[in-house]
Image (spheres, rainbow, N blue to C red):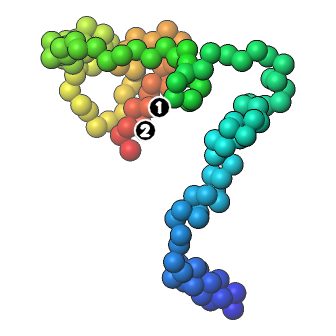
Amino acid sequence: YMGEAAEEDHKKKAAEDIDDVAMVDEMFGFVDGDDAAAGKPDGPSAYSDLPPGKGDDEGFGFGDSRVIPESEEDLSNFKFTKFASTYFQPPHTPVYVRRALKQPLLALKTPANQQAALSVWITILR
Protein backbone atom coordinates (compact mmCIF):
# COMPACT_ATOMS: atom_id res chain seq x y z
CA TYR A 1 0.00 0.00 0.00
CA MET A 2 1.58 3.24 -1.19
CA GLY A 3 0.12 5.54 1.51
CA GLU A 4 1.87 3.68 4.35
CA ALA A 5 5.25 3.87 2.60
CA ALA A 6 4.87 7.58 1.98
CA GLU A 7 3.82 8.09 5.59
CA GLU A 8 6.90 6.20 6.83
CA ASP A 9 9.18 8.33 4.61
CA HIS A 10 7.55 11.47 5.97
CA LYS A 11 8.08 10.30 9.56
CA LYS A 12 11.73 9.47 8.86
CA LYS A 13 12.37 12.88 7.31
CA ALA A 14 10.62 14.61 10.20
CA ALA A 15 12.74 12.70 12.71
CA GLU A 16 16.03 13.65 11.02
CA ASP A 17 17.98 16.54 12.47
CA ILE A 18 17.71 19.56 10.21
CA ASP A 19 20.71 21.81 9.85
CA ASP A 20 19.14 25.26 9.50
CA VAL A 21 22.33 26.91 8.28
CA ALA A 22 22.82 24.30 5.57
CA MET A 23 19.19 24.62 4.49
CA VAL A 24 19.42 28.40 4.21
CA ASP A 25 22.72 28.16 2.31
CA GLU A 26 21.17 25.64 -0.05
CA MET A 27 18.12 27.81 -0.68
CA PHE A 28 19.80 31.24 -0.79
CA GLY A 29 23.41 30.49 -1.62
CA PHE A 30 23.11 32.38 -4.90
CA VAL A 31 22.59 35.64 -3.01
CA ASP A 32 26.03 35.96 -1.41
CA GLY A 33 27.71 39.28 -2.05
CA ASP A 34 31.10 37.79 -2.92
CA ASP A 35 30.49 38.25 -6.67
CA ALA A 36 30.97 42.02 -6.49
CA ALA A 37 34.14 41.64 -4.45
CA ALA A 38 35.53 39.10 -6.94
CA GLY A 39 35.25 41.65 -9.76
CA LYS A 40 32.09 40.28 -11.31
CA PRO A 41 29.73 42.98 -12.56
CA ASP A 42 26.74 43.86 -10.46
CA GLY A 43 23.47 43.18 -12.29
CA PRO A 44 22.48 41.55 -15.56
CA SER A 45 24.96 41.55 -18.43
CA ALA A 46 22.45 43.38 -20.64
CA TYR A 47 23.14 46.52 -18.59
CA SER A 48 26.93 46.27 -18.64
CA ASP A 49 27.24 49.12 -21.17
CA LEU A 50 25.48 51.59 -18.85
CA PRO A 51 27.54 53.87 -16.62
CA PRO A 52 27.52 52.94 -12.95
CA GLY A 53 24.80 54.71 -11.04
CA LYS A 54 24.82 56.36 -7.69
CA GLY A 55 24.45 53.65 -5.06
CA ASP A 56 23.57 53.94 -1.45
CA ASP A 57 25.93 53.24 1.39
CA GLU A 58 24.09 50.14 2.55
CA GLY A 59 24.26 48.45 -0.85
CA PHE A 60 20.56 47.72 -1.11
CA GLY A 61 20.03 49.60 -4.37
CA PHE A 62 17.76 52.25 -2.90
CA GLY A 63 20.15 55.17 -3.26
CA ASP A 64 17.55 57.55 -4.64
CA SER A 65 14.54 56.29 -2.73
CA ARG A 66 11.87 58.71 -1.66
CA VAL A 67 11.55 57.54 1.93
CA ILE A 68 9.66 60.04 3.98
CA PRO A 69 10.95 60.24 7.54
CA GLU A 70 8.44 59.76 10.31
CA SER A 71 7.12 63.04 11.51
CA GLU A 72 6.73 63.97 15.11
CA GLU A 73 3.19 65.14 14.44
CA ASP A 74 0.68 64.56 17.22
CA LEU A 75 -1.99 62.28 15.78
CA SER A 76 -4.24 62.42 18.82
CA ASN A 77 -6.16 65.32 17.25
CA PHE A 78 -7.34 63.14 14.36
CA LYS A 79 -10.47 61.25 15.31
CA PHE A 80 -12.02 58.46 13.26
CA THR A 81 -15.52 59.64 14.11
CA LYS A 82 -14.79 63.02 12.53
CA PHE A 83 -13.35 61.33 9.43
CA ALA A 84 -16.39 59.06 9.16
CA SER A 85 -18.88 61.88 9.56
CA THR A 86 -17.01 63.92 6.95
CA TYR A 87 -16.34 61.30 4.27
CA PHE A 88 -18.71 58.33 4.73
CA GLN A 89 -21.76 58.26 2.51
CA PRO A 90 -25.13 58.38 4.27
CA PRO A 91 -26.44 56.25 6.05
CA HIS A 92 -23.05 54.87 7.16
CA THR A 93 -21.71 55.68 10.60
CA PRO A 94 -18.34 55.04 12.27
CA VAL A 95 -19.88 52.07 14.10
CA TYR A 96 -18.71 48.58 13.01
CA VAL A 97 -21.45 46.42 11.50
CA ARG A 98 -21.24 42.69 10.85
CA ARG A 99 -23.23 42.60 7.63
CA ALA A 100 -22.53 43.17 3.96
CA LEU A 101 -22.72 46.75 2.77
CA LYS A 102 -25.09 47.79 0.00
CA GLN A 103 -22.86 50.68 -1.04
CA PRO A 104 -19.24 51.56 -0.23
CA LEU A 105 -18.43 53.70 2.78
CA LEU A 106 -16.60 56.28 0.68
CA ALA A 107 -17.89 57.98 -2.46
CA LEU A 108 -16.01 56.22 -5.27
CA LYS A 109 -16.29 57.31 -8.90
CA THR A 110 -16.01 54.10 -10.90
CA PRO A 111 -18.23 51.03 -10.55
CA ALA A 112 -15.10 48.85 -10.49
CA ASN A 113 -13.78 50.71 -7.43
CA GLN A 114 -17.18 50.51 -5.76
CA GLN A 115 -17.34 46.76 -6.32
CA ALA A 116 -13.77 46.35 -5.08
CA ALA A 117 -14.60 48.24 -1.88
CA LEU A 118 -17.64 46.02 -1.27
CA SER A 119 -15.53 42.92 -1.91
CA VAL A 120 -12.90 44.08 0.57
CA TRP A 121 -15.59 44.56 3.18
CA ILE A 122 -16.94 41.05 2.60
CA THR A 123 -13.39 39.74 3.01
CA ILE A 124 -13.03 41.65 6.28
CA LEU A 125 -16.24 40.11 7.56
CA ARG A 126 -14.91 36.61 6.95
Q: Quadrant of residue 41?
A: top right
Give the percent coordinates (x, y) of residue 98. 28, 37
Q: Nearer the viewer, residue 122 or 54?
A: 54
Q: Are marks 2 and 1 in contact (CB under 8 Å)?
A: yes
Give the percent coordinates (x, y) of residue 66. 49, 14
Q: Nearer the viewer, residue 19 or 112?
A: 19
To which residue does mark 2 refer? Answer: 123
As drawn, 116 above or below 38:
above
As drawn, 88 above or below 35:
above
Q: Nearer the viewer, residue 52 or 121?
A: 52
Give the percent coordinates (x, y) of residue 7. 59, 84
Q: Quadrant of the N terminus?
A: bottom right
Q: Nearer the viewer, residue 105 or 41?
A: 41
Q: Residue at x 24, y 31 (%)?
A: 96
Q: Quadrant of residue 79?
A: top left
As drawn, 4 above or below 16:
below
Q: CA distance from mark 2 to mark 1?
A: 6 Å
Q: Residue at x 32, y 36 (%)?
A: 99
Q: Residues within 10 Å of mark 2 (few under 14, many from 20)?
A: few
Which residue, as the protein is rendered here, is positioned at the far bottom? Answer: 1
Type of amino acid at the residue the image marks with label 1 = Ser
To which residue does mark 1 refer? Answer: 119
Q: Quadrant of the C terminus?
A: top left
